[in-house]
Image (cartoon, rainbow, N blue to C red):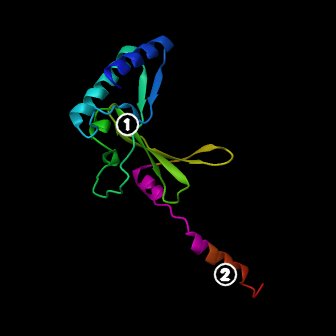
Amino acid sequence: LTPDGLKTLKRLIKETSAKVVTIDPMVSYIGGRVDMNKMNEVRAILGRLQKIAQETNSALLLFHHSRKSGNKDVSEDFERAAGSADFINAVRSALMVQRASNGEEYLLKHVKANYGPIGNSIGFKFGVDPTFAWGDFYTKSGATAFLATKVRPQREAARAFIIATLKDGPV
């Protein structure tokens, strides 16, 4: 996302008539000279991307990572984004993916919307067949409960199996 890279991006969008462009993850393309923790530097890059989107009538989907630490001091989901708050503040809409505590399911949460209300969250999971499956929709309180879904640890599952197997005596 250097000045030359942005010119190339704009040219390629026009040449291909692209309507959707993904940059995944942002940090891989932001460049070594940009401090992703400084609002003014992040805002400058995102402003240039916004201008390209407007001029080419395309949508840019920017993928960004959250902080790895489980910081409980954040009051909003979007505050978990790594680096400058402007990665979220400067965009028009933001979605966040979180893994449920059962480790098998995920939740896609709508955490920012400039042009309308925040939508409900939706669960999803990956599996063998189908490879990907959408789940149910959740309100904010329902999403919190979904993310806290627990599975029995392996030790507890093994204990339950042994007790059930031996309920009628030695085998």
> Of 121 and 91, which appears nearest the observer?
91
Quadrant where the C terminus sits is bottom right
- Secondary element at image label 1: helix
Expressed as whole percent of the image width and height from the top left, the position of residue 165 reads 72, 79
Expressed as whole percent of the image width and height from the top left, the position of residue 89 reads 28, 36
Q: Which residues are magenta?
A: 139-157
Q: Is residue 99 left or right of residue 75?
A: right
> Of 50 and 42, which appears nearest the observer?
42
Which residue: 48% across, 18% down?
18
Q: Dot 2 corresponds to which residue?
A: 163
Dominant secondary-structure state across the stretch colored magenta: helix
Quick check: is 88 in the magenta stretch? no
Which residue: 47% across, 20% down?
19
- Secondary element at image label 2: helix
Amino acid type for the residue under numbered disc 2: Ile
Q: Marks 2 and 1: in contact by CB < 8 Å?
A: no
Up the image or down, 135 lies above or below 19; here it is below
Quadrant where the N terminus sits is top left
Q: Dot 1 corresponds to which residue?
A: 27
Which residue: 50% across, 61% down?
149
Instruction: Please identify the quarter of the rendering in which residue 159 is found.
Output: bottom right
Looking at the image, the residue that sits furthest to the top is: 15
Q: Is residue 160 left or right of residue 117?
A: right
